[in-house]
Image (spheres, rainbow, N blue to C red):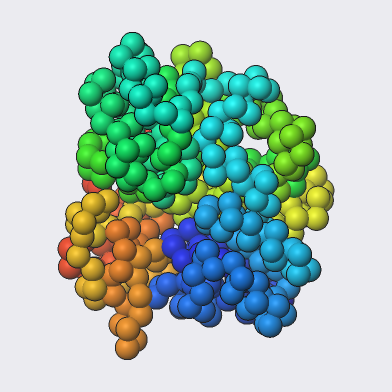
Amino acid sequence: MKLLVVGGGGREHAIIRSLKKNPQVETIYALPGNGGIAADATCVPIGATEIDKIVAFAVENAIDYAVVAPDDPLVLGCVDALEEKGIPCFGPRANAAIIEGSKVFSKNLMHKYGIPTAEYAVFDQMDEALSYLDTAPIPTVVKADGLALGKGVIIAETREAAKTAVRDMMEAGVFGKSGSRVVIEEFLTGPEVSVLAFTDGKVVKPMVSSMDHKRAGDNDTGLNTGGMGTVAPNPYYTPEIAERCMKEIFLPTIAAMNAEGRTFRGCLYFGLMLTPNGPKVIEYNCRFGDPETQVVLPLLESDLLTIMRACTNGTLAETEAHFADKHACCVILASKGYPQSYQKGFPITMTEEAAQHTYVAGAKLENGQLLTSGGRVTGTTAIADTLEQAIREAYRISDGVRFENAYRRSDIGQRALQALK
Protein backbone atom coordinates (compact mmCIF):
# COMPACT_ATOMS: atom_id res chain seq x y z
CA MET A 1 0.00 0.00 0.00
CA LYS A 2 1.03 3.56 -0.71
CA LEU A 3 0.17 5.99 2.09
CA LEU A 4 0.19 9.75 2.31
CA VAL A 5 0.48 11.61 5.62
CA VAL A 6 -0.26 15.33 5.61
CA GLY A 7 1.78 17.34 8.13
CA GLY A 8 5.34 17.84 9.25
CA GLY A 9 5.78 17.74 13.01
CA GLY A 10 6.52 15.37 15.89
CA ARG A 11 2.95 14.09 15.84
CA GLU A 12 3.26 13.12 12.17
CA HIS A 13 6.61 11.44 12.85
CA ALA A 14 4.95 9.31 15.56
CA ILE A 15 2.04 8.44 13.25
CA ILE A 16 4.39 7.47 10.39
CA ARG A 17 6.51 5.24 12.64
CA SER A 18 3.37 3.50 13.85
CA LEU A 19 1.97 3.05 10.32
CA LYS A 20 5.28 1.57 9.14
CA LYS A 21 4.76 -1.45 11.40
CA ASN A 22 2.06 -2.77 9.03
CA PRO A 23 3.72 -5.19 6.54
CA GLN A 24 1.31 -4.12 3.77
CA VAL A 25 2.81 -0.61 3.76
CA GLU A 26 5.35 -0.17 0.94
CA THR A 27 5.72 3.61 0.75
CA ILE A 28 4.77 6.53 2.97
CA TYR A 29 4.86 10.06 1.57
CA ALA A 30 4.95 12.93 4.09
CA LEU A 31 3.66 16.31 2.85
CA PRO A 32 5.72 18.29 3.73
CA GLY A 33 7.38 16.14 6.43
CA ASN A 34 10.63 17.46 7.92
CA GLY A 35 14.35 16.66 8.08
CA GLY A 36 13.86 14.01 10.78
CA ILE A 37 10.79 12.42 9.19
CA ALA A 38 12.91 11.93 6.04
CA ALA A 39 14.52 8.91 7.78
CA ASP A 40 11.11 7.15 7.89
CA ALA A 41 9.17 8.49 4.89
CA THR A 42 9.59 10.19 1.52
CA CYS A 43 9.18 13.92 2.16
CA VAL A 44 7.52 16.01 -0.54
CA PRO A 45 7.75 19.84 -0.36
CA ILE A 46 4.00 20.50 -0.48
CA GLY A 47 2.60 22.49 2.45
CA ALA A 48 -0.12 21.01 4.67
CA THR A 49 -2.63 23.68 3.60
CA GLU A 50 -1.92 23.47 -0.15
CA ILE A 51 -5.04 21.37 -0.66
CA ASP A 52 -5.08 21.41 -4.48
CA LYS A 53 -1.44 20.34 -4.67
CA ILE A 54 -1.97 17.59 -2.06
CA VAL A 55 -4.91 16.20 -4.05
CA ALA A 56 -3.01 16.38 -7.35
CA PHE A 57 -0.04 14.55 -5.79
CA ALA A 58 -2.30 11.86 -4.30
CA VAL A 59 -4.01 11.24 -7.63
CA GLU A 60 -0.76 11.21 -9.65
CA ASN A 61 0.87 8.77 -7.24
CA ALA A 62 -2.17 6.47 -6.91
CA ILE A 63 -2.28 6.82 -3.11
CA ASP A 64 -4.24 4.01 -1.44
CA TYR A 65 -4.94 5.79 1.86
CA ALA A 66 -4.31 9.26 3.27
CA VAL A 67 -3.97 10.46 6.87
CA VAL A 68 -4.63 14.18 7.35
CA ALA A 69 -3.06 14.96 10.72
CA PRO A 70 -3.03 18.75 11.42
CA ASP A 71 -6.03 20.95 12.25
CA ASP A 72 -5.67 23.55 9.45
CA PRO A 73 -6.03 21.20 6.44
CA LEU A 74 -8.88 19.35 8.17
CA VAL A 75 -10.79 22.59 8.77
CA LEU A 76 -10.03 23.66 5.19
CA GLY A 77 -11.60 20.46 3.80
CA CYS A 78 -8.57 18.40 2.80
CA VAL A 79 -10.42 15.14 3.56
CA ASP A 80 -13.43 16.25 1.48
CA ALA A 81 -11.17 17.09 -1.47
CA LEU A 82 -9.28 13.78 -1.32
CA GLU A 83 -12.45 11.71 -0.91
CA GLU A 84 -14.00 13.44 -3.92
CA LYS A 85 -11.14 11.95 -5.96
CA GLY A 86 -11.84 8.49 -4.51
CA ILE A 87 -8.95 8.47 -2.02
CA PRO A 88 -10.04 7.11 1.39
CA CYS A 89 -8.85 9.19 4.35
CA PHE A 90 -8.41 9.17 8.09
CA GLY A 91 -9.73 12.41 9.53
CA PRO A 92 -13.03 14.31 9.69
CA ARG A 93 -14.58 16.21 6.83
CA ALA A 94 -14.65 20.02 7.14
CA ASN A 95 -18.22 20.14 8.47
CA ALA A 96 -17.12 17.96 11.44
CA ALA A 97 -13.65 19.52 11.88
CA ILE A 98 -15.49 22.73 12.87
CA ILE A 99 -15.63 21.20 16.37
CA GLU A 100 -12.04 22.48 16.68
CA GLY A 101 -12.16 25.16 13.98
CA SER A 102 -14.66 27.25 15.94
CA LYS A 103 -14.69 27.54 19.73
CA VAL A 104 -18.08 29.25 19.43
CA PHE A 105 -19.50 26.26 17.54
CA SER A 106 -18.17 23.73 20.06
CA LYS A 107 -19.37 25.71 23.12
CA ASN A 108 -22.83 26.14 21.58
CA LEU A 109 -22.93 22.42 20.71
CA MET A 110 -22.15 21.44 24.31
CA HIS A 111 -24.71 23.91 25.64
CA LYS A 112 -27.42 22.63 23.28
CA TYR A 113 -26.83 18.95 24.04
CA GLY A 114 -26.09 19.19 27.78
CA ILE A 115 -22.43 18.16 27.57
CA PRO A 116 -20.62 19.41 30.72
CA THR A 117 -18.36 22.41 30.08
CA ALA A 118 -17.50 25.81 31.61
CA GLU A 119 -20.06 28.64 31.61
CA TYR A 120 -19.31 31.07 28.77
CA ALA A 121 -20.27 34.14 26.75
CA VAL A 122 -19.55 34.89 23.07
CA PHE A 123 -18.64 38.33 21.72
CA ASP A 124 -18.36 39.81 18.20
CA GLN A 125 -17.93 43.38 19.50
CA MET A 126 -14.90 44.42 21.53
CA ASP A 127 -16.77 47.06 23.58
CA GLU A 128 -19.31 44.47 24.74
CA ALA A 129 -16.57 42.03 25.72
CA LEU A 130 -14.72 44.73 27.69
CA SER A 131 -17.82 45.84 29.59
CA TYR A 132 -18.70 42.19 30.36
CA LEU A 133 -15.24 41.87 31.94
CA ASP A 134 -16.04 44.70 34.38
CA THR A 135 -18.15 42.25 36.41
CA ALA A 136 -17.04 38.78 35.22
CA PRO A 137 -15.55 36.47 37.88
CA ILE A 138 -11.73 36.53 37.93
CA PRO A 139 -9.61 34.57 37.00
CA THR A 140 -11.26 34.07 33.63
CA VAL A 141 -10.35 32.47 30.30
CA VAL A 142 -10.29 34.37 26.99
CA LYS A 143 -10.29 32.29 23.80
CA ALA A 144 -9.97 33.23 20.15
CA ASP A 145 -12.80 31.61 18.18
CA GLY A 146 -10.64 30.13 15.41
CA LEU A 147 -7.40 28.17 15.09
CA ALA A 148 -4.34 29.85 16.60
CA LEU A 149 -1.58 27.20 16.70
CA GLY A 150 -2.63 26.22 20.24
CA LYS A 151 -1.84 29.75 21.48
CA GLY A 152 -5.31 31.35 21.30
CA VAL A 153 -6.24 30.68 24.94
CA ILE A 154 -5.34 33.21 27.64
CA ILE A 155 -5.88 32.48 31.33
CA ALA A 156 -6.26 35.97 32.84
CA GLU A 157 -5.57 36.37 36.56
CA THR A 158 -6.73 40.01 36.62
CA ARG A 159 -9.41 42.11 34.89
CA GLU A 160 -6.72 44.17 33.18
CA ALA A 161 -5.01 41.04 31.82
CA ALA A 162 -8.37 39.80 30.49
CA LYS A 163 -9.06 43.15 28.80
CA THR A 164 -5.57 43.18 27.29
CA ALA A 165 -6.20 39.70 25.86
CA VAL A 166 -9.49 40.87 24.31
CA ARG A 167 -7.84 43.97 22.79
CA ASP A 168 -4.94 41.90 21.47
CA MET A 169 -7.32 39.50 19.76
CA MET A 170 -10.10 41.80 18.56
CA GLU A 171 -8.28 45.11 17.93
CA ALA A 172 -4.58 44.29 17.37
CA GLY A 173 -5.47 41.07 15.52
CA VAL A 174 -2.63 39.00 17.00
CA PHE A 175 -4.39 35.82 15.81
CA GLY A 176 -5.70 37.31 12.55
CA LYS A 177 -9.29 36.46 11.69
CA SER A 178 -9.30 33.73 14.36
CA GLY A 179 -9.59 36.40 17.07
CA SER A 180 -12.38 38.49 15.51
CA ARG A 181 -14.83 36.64 17.78
CA VAL A 182 -13.95 35.67 21.33
CA VAL A 183 -15.29 33.32 23.96
CA ILE A 184 -14.94 34.41 27.59
CA GLU A 185 -15.45 31.49 29.91
CA GLU A 186 -15.48 30.44 33.52
CA PHE A 187 -12.10 29.42 34.95
CA LEU A 188 -12.29 25.75 35.98
CA THR A 189 -10.03 24.08 38.52
CA GLY A 190 -8.84 20.48 38.84
CA PRO A 191 -6.42 18.13 37.11
CA GLU A 192 -6.35 18.29 33.30
CA VAL A 193 -6.56 15.14 31.21
CA SER A 194 -6.15 14.61 27.47
CA VAL A 195 -8.05 11.70 25.95
CA LEU A 196 -7.65 10.92 22.24
CA ALA A 197 -10.34 8.65 20.83
CA PHE A 198 -10.81 6.70 17.62
CA THR A 199 -14.33 7.00 16.22
CA ASP A 200 -16.18 5.96 13.07
CA GLY A 201 -19.13 8.19 13.90
CA LYS A 202 -20.91 5.41 15.80
CA VAL A 203 -18.46 3.77 18.18
CA VAL A 204 -15.88 5.52 20.37
CA LYS A 205 -12.66 3.71 21.32
CA PRO A 206 -10.63 5.91 23.66
CA MET A 207 -6.84 5.64 23.60
CA VAL A 208 -4.80 5.65 26.78
CA SER A 209 -5.16 8.96 28.68
CA SER A 210 -2.28 11.42 28.94
CA MET A 211 -1.07 14.52 30.79
CA ASP A 212 0.43 17.42 28.84
CA HIS A 213 2.76 20.09 30.26
CA LYS A 214 1.85 23.30 28.44
CA ARG A 215 3.90 25.95 30.23
CA ALA A 216 7.40 26.74 29.01
CA GLY A 217 9.09 26.61 32.43
CA ASP A 218 9.45 24.23 35.37
CA ASN A 219 6.62 24.10 37.92
CA ASP A 220 4.20 25.28 35.22
CA THR A 221 5.64 28.77 34.95
CA GLY A 222 6.13 30.92 31.87
CA LEU A 223 4.12 31.17 28.68
CA ASN A 224 1.81 28.56 27.20
CA THR A 225 3.43 26.44 24.48
CA GLY A 226 2.28 23.68 22.17
CA GLY A 227 3.42 21.27 24.93
CA MET A 228 6.79 20.66 26.61
CA GLY A 229 6.25 16.99 27.41
CA THR A 230 3.68 14.33 28.22
CA VAL A 231 3.12 11.22 30.26
CA ALA A 232 0.63 8.38 29.80
CA PRO A 233 -1.55 7.12 31.31
CA ASN A 234 -2.76 10.07 33.38
CA PRO A 235 -3.04 8.89 37.02
CA TYR A 236 -5.99 11.20 37.71
CA TYR A 237 -8.05 9.45 35.04
CA THR A 238 -9.41 6.48 36.99
CA PRO A 239 -11.60 3.71 35.51
CA GLU A 240 -14.60 5.28 37.30
CA ILE A 241 -13.95 8.68 35.71
CA ALA A 242 -13.35 7.02 32.33
CA GLU A 243 -16.76 5.35 32.54
CA ARG A 244 -18.40 8.65 33.47
CA CYS A 245 -16.69 10.46 30.57
CA MET A 246 -17.86 7.82 28.10
CA LYS A 247 -21.47 8.21 29.29
CA GLU A 248 -21.61 11.98 29.85
CA ILE A 249 -19.13 13.34 27.28
CA PHE A 250 -17.74 10.99 24.60
CA LEU A 251 -20.89 9.26 23.33
CA PRO A 252 -23.08 12.38 23.73
CA THR A 253 -20.57 14.38 21.63
CA ILE A 254 -20.67 11.83 18.79
CA ALA A 255 -24.49 11.73 19.01
CA ALA A 256 -24.66 15.55 18.99
CA MET A 257 -22.48 15.77 15.88
CA ASN A 258 -24.66 13.15 14.15
CA ALA A 259 -27.79 15.07 15.12
CA GLU A 260 -26.29 18.19 13.55
CA GLY A 261 -25.57 16.31 10.32
CA ARG A 262 -21.83 16.53 10.98
CA THR A 263 -20.79 12.91 11.52
CA PHE A 264 -17.27 12.82 12.94
CA ARG A 265 -14.85 10.11 11.77
CA GLY A 266 -11.20 10.03 12.77
CA CYS A 267 -9.46 11.00 15.99
CA LEU A 268 -11.45 13.20 18.36
CA TYR A 269 -9.40 14.76 21.16
CA PHE A 270 -11.10 15.56 24.43
CA GLY A 271 -9.33 18.12 26.63
CA LEU A 272 -10.92 17.54 30.04
CA MET A 273 -10.84 19.18 33.45
CA LEU A 274 -11.67 16.95 36.41
CA THR A 275 -13.46 19.59 38.46
CA PRO A 276 -14.97 19.14 41.95
CA ASN A 277 -18.32 18.92 40.09
CA GLY A 278 -17.17 16.15 37.78
CA PRO A 279 -15.37 16.00 34.41
CA LYS A 280 -15.95 18.91 32.01
CA VAL A 281 -14.77 19.61 28.46
CA ILE A 282 -12.20 22.41 28.14
CA GLU A 283 -11.72 21.90 24.40
CA TYR A 284 -12.15 19.53 21.50
CA ASN A 285 -9.51 18.93 18.85
CA CYS A 286 -10.42 17.30 15.54
CA ARG A 287 -7.14 15.34 15.37
CA PHE A 288 -4.31 13.68 17.28
CA GLY A 289 -2.82 16.01 19.90
CA ASP A 290 0.82 17.03 19.86
CA PRO A 291 2.78 15.92 21.93
CA GLU A 292 0.16 13.50 23.35
CA THR A 293 0.49 11.33 20.23
CA GLN A 294 4.17 10.77 21.05
CA VAL A 295 3.27 8.90 24.28
CA VAL A 296 -0.04 7.35 23.23
CA LEU A 297 0.89 5.66 19.93
CA PRO A 298 4.05 3.96 21.29
CA LEU A 299 1.73 2.17 23.75
CA LEU A 300 -0.62 0.96 20.97
CA GLU A 301 -0.30 -2.80 20.49
CA SER A 302 -2.95 -3.15 17.76
CA ASP A 303 -2.24 -2.14 14.16
CA LEU A 304 -2.78 1.59 13.62
CA LEU A 305 -3.55 1.38 9.89
CA THR A 306 -6.22 -1.28 10.50
CA ILE A 307 -7.88 0.92 13.15
CA MET A 308 -7.72 4.02 10.94
CA ARG A 309 -9.32 2.21 8.02
CA ALA A 310 -12.04 0.89 10.34
CA CYS A 311 -12.81 4.51 11.34
CA THR A 312 -13.14 5.38 7.65
CA ASN A 313 -15.22 2.29 6.78
CA GLY A 314 -17.52 2.33 9.82
CA THR A 315 -16.27 -1.02 11.15
CA LEU A 316 -14.63 0.16 14.38
CA ALA A 317 -16.98 -1.94 16.56
CA GLU A 318 -15.32 -5.17 15.34
CA THR A 319 -11.76 -3.78 15.30
CA GLU A 320 -9.36 -4.17 18.20
CA ALA A 321 -7.63 -1.10 19.66
CA HIS A 322 -5.47 -2.47 22.44
CA PHE A 323 -2.86 -0.56 24.47
CA ALA A 324 0.02 -1.92 26.54
CA ASP A 325 -0.38 -1.83 30.30
CA LYS A 326 2.78 0.26 30.65
CA HIS A 327 3.82 3.89 31.15
CA ALA A 328 5.28 6.35 28.65
CA CYS A 329 7.03 9.71 29.03
CA CYS A 330 7.97 12.18 26.30
CA VAL A 331 10.46 14.99 26.93
CA ILE A 332 10.51 17.88 24.44
CA LEU A 333 13.74 19.66 23.51
CA ALA A 334 12.95 23.20 22.37
CA SER A 335 14.91 26.17 21.05
CA LYS A 336 15.75 28.60 23.84
CA GLY A 337 13.33 31.52 23.64
CA TYR A 338 10.35 29.42 22.45
CA PRO A 339 7.39 30.16 22.34
CA GLN A 340 8.53 33.68 21.51
CA SER A 341 11.60 34.46 19.39
CA TYR A 342 14.47 31.99 19.03
CA GLN A 343 17.44 31.31 16.79
CA LYS A 344 17.49 28.37 14.42
CA GLY A 345 19.87 26.61 12.06
CA PHE A 346 21.93 24.76 14.72
CA PRO A 347 23.21 21.26 13.84
CA ILE A 348 21.43 18.39 15.68
CA THR A 349 23.27 15.22 16.66
CA MET A 350 21.74 12.07 18.16
CA THR A 351 23.13 8.84 19.54
CA GLU A 352 21.82 5.72 17.83
CA GLU A 353 19.64 4.94 20.86
CA ALA A 354 18.24 8.49 20.97
CA ALA A 355 17.39 8.40 17.25
CA GLN A 356 15.26 5.27 17.77
CA HIS A 357 13.24 6.92 20.56
CA THR A 358 13.02 10.47 19.21
CA TYR A 359 10.35 12.10 17.07
CA VAL A 360 11.52 15.15 15.16
CA ALA A 361 9.29 18.22 15.02
CA GLY A 362 11.27 21.31 14.03
CA ALA A 363 14.25 20.35 11.87
CA LYS A 364 15.38 20.49 8.25
CA LEU A 365 17.98 18.56 6.28
CA GLU A 366 20.72 20.53 4.57
CA ASN A 367 23.53 18.68 2.79
CA GLY A 368 22.83 15.60 4.91
CA GLN A 369 22.97 17.57 8.19
CA LEU A 370 19.92 17.90 10.45
CA LEU A 371 19.45 21.55 11.55
CA THR A 372 16.99 23.13 13.99
CA SER A 373 14.16 24.97 12.22
CA GLY A 374 11.41 25.34 14.82
CA GLY A 375 10.50 26.10 18.42
CA ARG A 376 9.89 22.55 19.54
CA VAL A 377 12.68 20.55 17.93
CA THR A 378 12.46 16.96 19.19
CA GLY A 379 10.44 14.74 21.52
CA THR A 380 12.09 11.70 23.12
CA THR A 381 9.79 8.96 24.38
CA ALA A 382 10.53 6.07 26.72
CA ILE A 383 8.24 3.21 27.79
CA ALA A 384 8.61 1.31 31.05
CA ASP A 385 6.67 -0.74 33.61
CA THR A 386 6.40 2.19 36.02
CA LEU A 387 5.99 5.91 35.47
CA GLU A 388 9.11 6.64 37.49
CA GLN A 389 11.19 4.40 35.22
CA ALA A 390 9.65 5.90 32.06
CA ILE A 391 10.49 9.45 33.20
CA ARG A 392 14.05 8.51 34.17
CA GLU A 393 14.61 6.73 30.84
CA ALA A 394 13.12 9.55 28.75
CA TYR A 395 15.51 12.06 30.33
CA ARG A 396 18.47 9.71 30.03
CA ILE A 397 17.82 9.00 26.35
CA SER A 398 17.10 12.64 25.56
CA ASP A 399 20.60 13.47 26.85
CA GLY A 400 21.71 11.82 23.59
CA VAL A 401 20.01 14.57 21.52
CA ARG A 402 22.30 17.60 21.21
CA PHE A 403 22.03 21.02 19.60
CA GLU A 404 23.17 24.49 20.60
CA ASN A 405 20.46 26.59 22.23
CA ALA A 406 18.50 23.53 23.45
CA TYR A 407 16.33 23.70 26.54
CA ARG A 408 13.88 21.36 28.23
CA ARG A 409 11.77 21.29 31.34
CA SER A 410 13.29 19.23 34.14
CA ASP A 411 10.01 18.26 35.83
CA ILE A 412 7.98 16.40 33.17
CA GLY A 413 5.82 13.80 34.93
CA GLN A 414 6.48 15.03 38.48
CA ARG A 415 2.86 16.08 39.01
CA ALA A 416 1.73 12.64 37.84
CA LEU A 417 4.15 10.96 40.28
CA GLN A 418 2.72 13.07 43.13
CA ALA A 419 -0.77 11.96 42.15
CA LEU A 420 0.26 8.30 42.25
CA LYS A 421 1.58 8.79 45.79
Q: Nearer the viewer, residue 199 or 205?
A: 199
- Residue at x 75%, y 47% (from the top left corner): 200
Residue 135: x percent and y percent?
33, 11
From the viewer's perspective, tell me whether residue 207 is left or right of residue 382.
Answer: right
Q: Which of 226 and 137 is in front in this view?
A: 137
Placement of the C terminus among the 4 image quadrants: top left
From the viewer's perspective, tell me whether residue 355 is left or right of residue 163.
Answer: right
Residue 290: x percent and y percent?
45, 51
- Residue at x 73%, y 73% (from the top left corner): 64
Q: In this view, does 257 lie above or below 54?
A: above
Q: Nearer the viewer, residue 319 or 352?
A: 319
Evaluate whether residue 207 shows in this view: no
Q: In this view, does 185 lie above or below 164?
A: above
Q: Quadrant of residue 363?
A: bottom left
- Residue at x 52%, y 55% (from the top left corner): 72
Q: In which quarter of the image is residue 214?
A: top left
Residue 262: x percent and y percent?
72, 41
Evaluate whether residue 174 shows in this view: yes
Residue 190: x percent and y percent?
41, 22
Q: Nearer the viewer, residue 238 or 263?
A: 263
The residue most toward the top is 135
From the viewer's perspective, tell me whether residue 305 is left or right of residue 405.
Answer: right
Number of labels in the image equals: 0
- Residue at x 67%, y 82% (from the top left corner): 61
Placement of the N terminus among the 4 image quadrants: bottom right
From the viewer's perspective, tell me whether residue 101 is left or right of residue 166.
Answer: right
